[in-house]
Amino acid sequence: MKYLNNFNYFTHQGLMKEAVDTSIFENYIFNPKNIFETFCSLTQKTYPYGTEEEVLKWIDIPLQKDEYGNYFIKIGESNTMFTSHFDTACSKQNPVNLITFEKDNDRFITTDGKTILGADDKAGVTIMLYMIENKIPGLYYFFIGEERGGIGSIALASNKNHQNLNGIKKCISFDRRGYTSIITHQLFESCCNDNFADALCQEFIKNGINMQKDDTGIFTDSANFIGIIENCTNISVGYFNEHSTQEYQNISYLEKISQACLKINWEKLS
């Protein structure tokens, strides 16, 4: 696949854009193996901090709520925690008009330009729901308030002896823009060792995604576990221009990385 690098590519003449028919969600049946419909269901409106519980309408799995307001589920036995976040970077809730289009055989989703899309981080949520449906072992955490500085993850990390963190050696966030990043630094410090990052890159490369180590990370929830969990990282999930009305998501990439995540031996990474 050839992926795009900037939004201006989408403004070329002749690009066919179509509104997503959201009437399909009036009688929505949760099917996390359908990446497109799952992503669209999660991005029909924005979810600022404090409204995250409303996202559960679109998620028909028995998520538990911890004492800090975060949602989680454990699948099997694992030393890996996967994270994404339910909130979006906005101050109030708005309906989102979804627009889809294709370019170079890839499918994309954006908005009508009046709101953010919320691919940050409903793309990560979509991947994790796909992994859960396919019973990949792990502790899956859907955090609240990431866009307000990681409110939910700070609360959990502050209790480093929390029972949910027992035995966790890796924290994998799905919340990075672009297509190729395995983040090695957040908050101006190392968040994982080179051996771990190299091994994770190779796992993705074996499954058709050219990931590379990237030391330009800023912050997502996994950063709050630096010093508590041995290796913390953030992985590209195919969105761009986050926090803006020009945000867009490559759905073809999202499908590809979701499938790759089923084939990685997460437990052997160290």
Image (cartoon, rainbow, N blue to C red):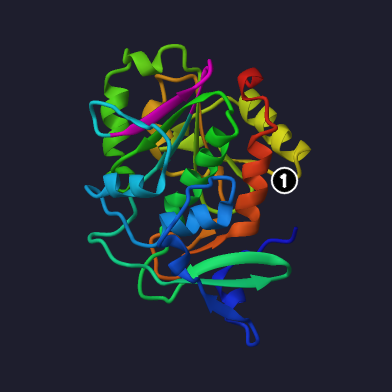
At a point 53% along the width and 18% down the height, the residue shown is 76
Front one among 114 and 212: 114
Rendered location of residue 88, percent (x, y): 34, 54
At a point 30% along the width and 41% down the height, the residue shown is 144
- Left/right of residue 236 with respect to residue 195 in the rendered view: left
Q: Which residue is mark 1?
A: 210
Rendered location of residue 225, percent (x, y): 39, 26
Quadrant where the C terminus is found in the figure = top right
The quarter of the picture where residue 203 lies is: top right
On screen, 34 above or below 153? below
- What range of the chain is rendered magenta? 70-81
Rendered location of residue 234, percent (x, y): 51, 39
At a point 34% along the width and 61% down the height, the residue shown is 45
State the SS at label 1: loop
Q: Amino acid at mark 1?
A: Asn
Q: Residue farthest to the front?
A: 27
Magenta region includes residue 76: yes
Pointer 1: residues within 10 angstroms few (<14), some, or many (20+)? some
